[in-house]
Image (spheres, coloured by chain):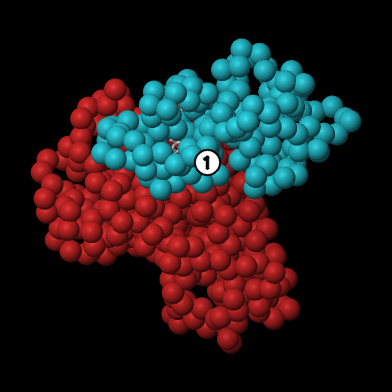
């Protein structure tokens, strides 16, 4: 079945099996391996990408459901190689350890900032509630998002 | 890897029904895919046809037709939780929608999918009982309308082969008037207090193993209609979920609330009755001890929320009807 959609600003026309998930097409047919498969069932958020600027678990979406839509992956955050403010903040604030959760975290944070450029701490927590990280303990990730949004306070971030 | 299936991606309901005629074997409709895709991925579901409903505009609407609030079955929980219309006219539904899964899940998961999946813990289900919602179901044999409660419990009334849930609707007016200032006429039999609106409030609560992104261990929705003067309960609907195969109404408790004021003594009595319901529903189950404690907290949350709403309503109704200023009544989709 033919699938027409836009990925990171580029129009794509692909031959895609009905049973392929969006995650499979991004990783295997388009070579965009930023989105990761953690659980494959919507629990971990490692596969998070944006569809029409909304964060979704690409492991739960059939690729053909993205027909006509615009998909953004972590690769789309730095199209020319220059890092997005969020990516820079993640590096600076030590929000990355093994990095497996990072592409998903970044995309959930990106979706939030697109909708709400100056989120509260609570809004950041809610936006990232569907992304699990087994390394960082979340505090540095929160700090990084606040930093990118310019809402970082001097005070301590509440322990997760 | 999923089994092989054929897929149809119709653009309209009419096209969907036409396509059905040519489909053999098991048909599965696809909404957001948050239940169906992982089930197909691990082989639990192996339909011959998957029919994607997620890009049919007429199924994605949220609107008020002057009498009832109407949602298309593919309205997502993000859309429902963010709708000023739902917040105003069926608050418990907006609250439940906002507590389903994570942002990513809510951006895809649909109300129709929640109903069709019929999980014992589905968060919209007690809400649909509390709002006395009706479903519009379409299929090869045409259209049928059915109350959600009958759809859920009566043998043979659930989805038949090829049938899809097209829409969900319920009577407008958690507040007796609409957000745009139009008056929602109250049912005459319920209300005769000299032209003043009855107060209608609803609330949803849920208890899970953590604060967010959690499948309910218990969930509850309540709807109350009260006469505006003394705040006497004239009608109520109370539903509990995650206790049995499907959520259920508590008609005895509803009956006991009638004629009483929504005060702390009512809440104490209702909480006691709820604990008895838990004991009766899951006697001796390891979760009984936990759930009979948990339900106290849940009752306190839900009834506390209702009390709070009633006091706000009373304050605003003594200043004349709210003209709906401030909030925008957006209608989505249609
Ligand atoms: C991580 C995670 C967290 C979750 N958290 C919650 C939660 O907190 N609360 C909760 O209630 N649920 C939760 N769920 C379950 C799920 O997201 C919901 O049940 C959701 O509403 C299903 O909707 P969907 O559109 O994704 O359904 P789909 O997966 O598309 O479909 C589910 C079933 O319904 C059928 N179907 C779909 N639409 C229709 C229709 N219009 N007519 C007829 N049949 C139809 C499908 O054929 C399938 O059998 C969670 C799921 C995950 C993966
Ligand atoms: S891989 Fe998609 S949520 Fe875990
Ligand atoms: S950095 Fe390792 S899982 Fe988050």
Q: Nearer the viewer, residue B179 or A54?
A: A54
Q: Is residue B33 visible?
A: no
- Please name the residue shown 48% across and 22% down the image: A33
Q: Is residue B324 above or below residue B208?
A: below
Q: Find the residue positioned furthest to the front.
A: A80
What residue is rendered at 11% in x and 50% in y? B22
Q: Which residue is mark 1?
A: A9
Left or right: where B284 falls relative to B80 = left
Q: Chain of mark 1?
A: A
Q: Position of residue A22 (x, y in %)?
A: 40, 33
The spot of residue B71 in percent (x, y) is 42, 61
Q: Which colour is chain A painted?
A: cyan
Of residues B13 and A27, the one drawn nearer to the viewer in this rendering: A27
**Quarter of the image that includes the N terminus of chain B:** top left
State the residue in front, B10 or B94: B10
Is residue A13 placed above or below A83 in the rendered structure? Answer: below
- Return the x and y of residue B10 as percentages of the image width and height: 27, 53
The image quarter containing residue A101 is top right
Chain coloured red in this rendering: B
Quarter where residue A13 is shown = top left
Residue A129, compared with residue B49, is above or below; it is above
In the displayed image of the protein, which residue is found farthest to the right? Answer: A154
Instruction: Identify which residue is drawn at 55% across, 44% down.
Output: A53
| Local SS, label 1 | loop
x and y, in percent, of residue A55 in the image = 54, 39
Q: Quadrant of ligand 1?
A: top left
Can I make out residue A42 in this image?
yes
Side of B320 relative to B227 (left or right): right
B64 lies above or below B128:
below
């Amino acid at each position: 079945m033919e699938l027409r959609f836009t990925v990171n600003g580029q129009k794509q026309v692909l031959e895609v099996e009905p049973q392929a998930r969006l995650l499979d097409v991004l990783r295997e047919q388009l070579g965009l391996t930023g989105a990761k498969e953690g659980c494959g069932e919507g629990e971990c958020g490692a596969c998070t990408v944006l569809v029409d600027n909304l964060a979704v678990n690409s492991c739960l979406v059939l690729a053909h459901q993205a027909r006509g839509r615009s998909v953004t992956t972590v690769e789309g955050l730095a199209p020319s190689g220059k890092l997005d403010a969020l990516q820079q903040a993640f590096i600076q604030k030590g929000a990355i350890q093994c990095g497996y959760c990072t592409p998903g975290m970044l995309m959930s944070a990106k979706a939030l900032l697109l909708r709400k450029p100056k989120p509260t701490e609570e809004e950041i927590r809610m936006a990232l509630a569907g992304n699990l990280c087994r390394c960082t303990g979340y505090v540095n990730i929160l700090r990084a998002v606040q930093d990118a949004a310019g809402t970082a306070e001097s005070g301590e971030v509440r322990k997760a | 890897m999923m089994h092989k299936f054929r897929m149809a991606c119709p653009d309209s309901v009419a096209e969907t029904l036409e396509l059905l005629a040519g489909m053999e074997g098991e048909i599965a409709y696809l909404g957001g895919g948050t239940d169906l895709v992982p089930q197909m991925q691990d082989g639990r579901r192996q339909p011959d046809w998957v029919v994607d409903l997620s890009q049919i505009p007429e199924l994605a609407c949220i609107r008020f037709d002057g009498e009832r609030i109407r949602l298309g079955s593919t309205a997502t929980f993000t859309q429902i939780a963010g709708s000023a219309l739902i917040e105003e006219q069926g608050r418990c539904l907006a609250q439940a929608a906002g507590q389903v899964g994570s942002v990513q899940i809510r951006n895809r998961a649909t109300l129709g999918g929640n109903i069709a999946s019929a999980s014992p813990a589905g968060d919209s289900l007690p809400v649909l009982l509390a709002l006395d919602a009706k479903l519009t179901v379409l299929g090869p044999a045409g259209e049928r309308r059915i109350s959600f409660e009958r759809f859920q419990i009566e043998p043979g009334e659930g989805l038949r082969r090829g049938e899809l849930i097209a829409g969900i609707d319920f009577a407008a007016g958690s507040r007796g008037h609409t957000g745009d200032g139009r008056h929602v006429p109250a049912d005459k039999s319920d209300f005769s207090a000299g032209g003043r609106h009855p107060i209608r409030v609803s609330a949803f609560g849920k208890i899970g193993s953590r604060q967010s992104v959690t499948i309910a261990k218990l969930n509850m929705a309540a709807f109350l209609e009260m006469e505006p003067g003394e705040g006497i309960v004239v009608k109520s609907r109370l539903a509990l979920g995650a206790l049995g195969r499907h959520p259920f109404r508590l008609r005895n408790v509803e009956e006991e609330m009638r004629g009483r004021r929504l005060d702390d003594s009512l809440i104490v009595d209702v909480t006691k009755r709820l604990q008895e319901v838990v004991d009766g529903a899951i006697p001796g189950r390891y979760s009984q001890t936990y759930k009979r404690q948990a339900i106290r907290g849940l009752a306190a949350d839900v009834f506390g929320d209702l009390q709070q709403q009633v006091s706000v309503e009373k304050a605003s109704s003594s200043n004349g009807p709210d003209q709906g200023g401030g909030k925008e009544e957006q209608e989505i989709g249609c």
